Image (cartoon, grey):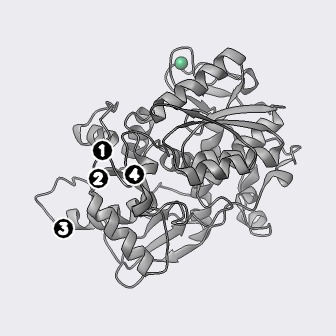
Amino acid sequence: MAFQFICSICHQKYDPASLVWRCSCGGVLDVAPFPVHFSLETTQKRFAGLWRYREALPFDSSFTDWQQITMGEGSTPLLAAGAALPSVFLKVEYLMPTSSYKDRGAVVLMAKARELGVRRVVCDSSGNAGVALAAYATRAGIDCEVYVPASASAKKLKQMAEHGATVHSIQGTREDAAKAAIAVVEQENLFYASHIYNPFFFQGTKTYAFEIWEQFEGRVPDLLVVPVGNGTLVLGPYYGFQDLLAAGLIKTMPRILAVQAENCAPLARAFREGAEVAQPVVNEGTIAEGIAIAAPARNRQILAAIRESQGAIITVAEADIVAAHRELARSGLYVEPTAAVAYAGLSTYLRQADDPELSIRREPFRQGTQTAVVALTGSGLKASPESILTRPCDHDN
Ligand SMILES: [Zn+2]
């Protein structure tokens, strides 16, 4: 079957082979809904990894090149958080080939580029997404150019280059790097492998939902706690749970509790104010560099998805992120600071739920009787709190 893009605003459809990356009306694109098939019986006989759900991914069954591109990404562990947090589970997403959950999106996006016959892609990133895209591009036999802000982490840039990507260092902010990438994409009519704009990336991150459903033996948790910057781990799982709902396999979707760093929280502000669209903010600097997004392109969709799930967007202070990072490390889990944000968020949420003065108007999470899954998105081997210089809006997730 032909998979199509559909504009999130005006519903105009596009052929992905046309290389369009945004609607002429300015709206961001999604993959148009398509029928998905699940069978736990079939799935459980397959090797671990997200390709066990391939009938729910936007590929024809005749496409088998994914077998050369996959590195076994997905099927990450779900751990009990411990006695202090009964019925809370940690999804260890940093146990991935490039050490972050971005591999879910990158493998699907690059497999799709390969299926479309693309030989050269352009993307922009300064962090985990760029690393994941570079790694999967080389496996797919595709030339990858990554535009990065000159201030980006040297460690991550080195990894991109070692995977064979051409790294273009751009003076200026994260947004300036994106502008440079888009200029080349448009001038040369290239495939824009953006983890923000390209909707195939979100088709990969939706497998996060399928795995949780499988690990909960065909049920879903009550609460999903995720960090949010550009929304790849909000919208992907939201689409995944929508697929499960449409297939009649679940009756409700979990509430999504999305967490931002207080110092860069455009989505949390819009949520509090009841706004449909988030206004850009000034990034005041945060160690959660991966979600320090001052103007998220998919803000309207993120806000709508969280509201539809009956969830909430909250913020955590820098001190709370540091404390959560330390607590996780002392329990043996070494994450990067951005990956401690969701864990910090759950603690904040539980504290606020007990405090009638605070403005959590949603149903509180009942520890012990309800279940929550907290995402641990990236490895501490990539970045520690001490190694991060906080610069306004330089990073992405
Ligand atoms: Zn449109």
**Residue flagged by tag 2: what amino acid is it?**
Thr
Q: In the rendered structure, which disc, 1 or 2, sits on the residue that comes first in sequence?
A: 1
Marks 3 and 1 sit apart, C-alpha to C-alpha, by 20 Å
Residue in view at x 56 percent, y 50 percent: 154
Q: Nearer the viewer, residue 298 or 249?
A: 298
Question: Is 320 on the left or on the right of 224, as rendered?
Answer: left
CB under 8 Å between callouts 1 and 4? no
Q: In the rendered structure, which disc, 1 or 4, sits on the residue that comes first in sequence?
A: 1
How many C-alpha atoms fall within 10 Å of the one at disc 1: few (<14), some, or many (≥20)? many
User: Of helix, strand and loop, which one carries label 1?
Assistant: helix
Q: Which residue is mark 3?
A: 354
Marks 3 and 2 sit apart, C-alpha to C-alpha, by 16 Å
**Residue flagged by tag 1: what amino acid is it?**
Ala
Residue 348's disc number: none
Residue 268's disc number: 1
Q: In the rendered structure, which disc, 4 or 2, sits on the residue that comes first in sequence?
A: 2
Q: Which residue is mark 2?
A: 315
Q: In the rendered structure, which disc, 3 or 4, sits on the residue that comes first in sequence?
A: 3
Farthest residue to the bottom: give it: 83
Marks 1 and 2 sit apart, C-alpha to C-alpha, by 7 Å
Q: Nearer the viewer, residue 378 or 391?
A: 391
User: Of helix, strand and loop, which one carries label 4?
Assistant: loop
How many C-alpha atoms fall within 10 Å of the one at disc 4: few (<14), some, or many (≥20)? some
Task: Count numbered badges in the picture.
Answer: 4
How many C-alpha atoms fall within 10 Å of the one at disc 3: few (<14), some, or many (≥20)? few
Q: Nearer the viewer, mark 1 or mark 4?
A: 4
Q: Which residue is mark 4?
A: 389
Q: Nearer the viewer, mark 4 or mark 2?
A: 4
